[in-house]
Image (tube, rainbow, N blue to C red):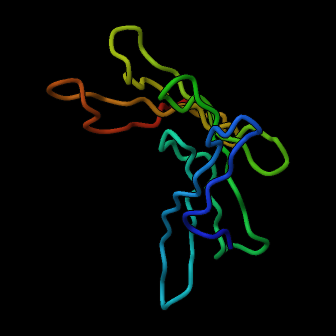
Amino acid sequence: MPRVGDPNHDAAGNMTYDHRLTYVAKGGSVRIWFIKDALGRRITTQEYWRSPMAATRYLYSGQNIVAEYDDNGTRLRYYVYGATYVDERVVMHHEASQKNCVYLTKDLHTVGRAAWMQD
């Protein structure tokens, strides 16, 4: 497992990755490990409870996740954002099922529920 706190730097001395990690444990063993970048964005999720271990990689546009990929580079999901607010997530498309999940907002335009669209 990666060590917590051992920052990597480029040739100019800029921090490129700080190993800020968060994990979920059960019975003393790590089940899921979240790896974040220097901006605090989750860039990889490693699931140790699966056999073989599965990892999901996240692609961002600014602060928003726009797609998720597996270790083979296969796109798992992509997200569509609205034009009104910075973090206005509208739809998640699930590649395996080819279905869309629509985010339903409530007061202050926060997500209240999510609904899978029917064919």
Taking 27 as reference, is 6 above or below it? above
> Please, which residue is most extreme toward the top here?
83
Which one is in front, 56 or 76? 56
**Which quadrant holds residue 115?**
top left
**Which quadrant holds residue 85?**
top left
Q: Quadrant of the N terminus?
A: bottom right
Point out residue 56 in the picture as x, y percentages from the top left corner: 67, 51
64 relative to 43 in the view: left or right: left
> Please, which residue is most extreme toward the left here?
107
Which one is in front, 81 or 25? 25
> Please, which residue is most extreme toward the bottom here?
27
Q: Quadrant of the C terminus?
A: top right
**Which quadrant holds residue 93?**
top right
At 37% from the left and 38% from the top, the residue drawn is 114
Which one is in front, 20 or 100? 20
At 42% from the left and 26% from the top, the residue drawn is 89
> Please, which residue is most extreme toward the front here?
12
114 relative to 35 in the view: left or right: left
Point out residue 6 in the picture as x, y percentages from the top left corner: 61, 62
At 48% from the left and 91% from the top, the residue drawn is 27
Taking 45 as reference, is 99 above or below it? above
Point out residue 50 in the picture as x, y percentages from the top left corner: 69, 73
State the count of labels.
0
At 54% from the left and 43% from the top, the residue drawn is 38
Point out residue 71 in the picture as x, y percentages from the top left corner: 80, 51
Which one is in front, 8 or 110? 8
54 relative to 35 in the view: left or right: right
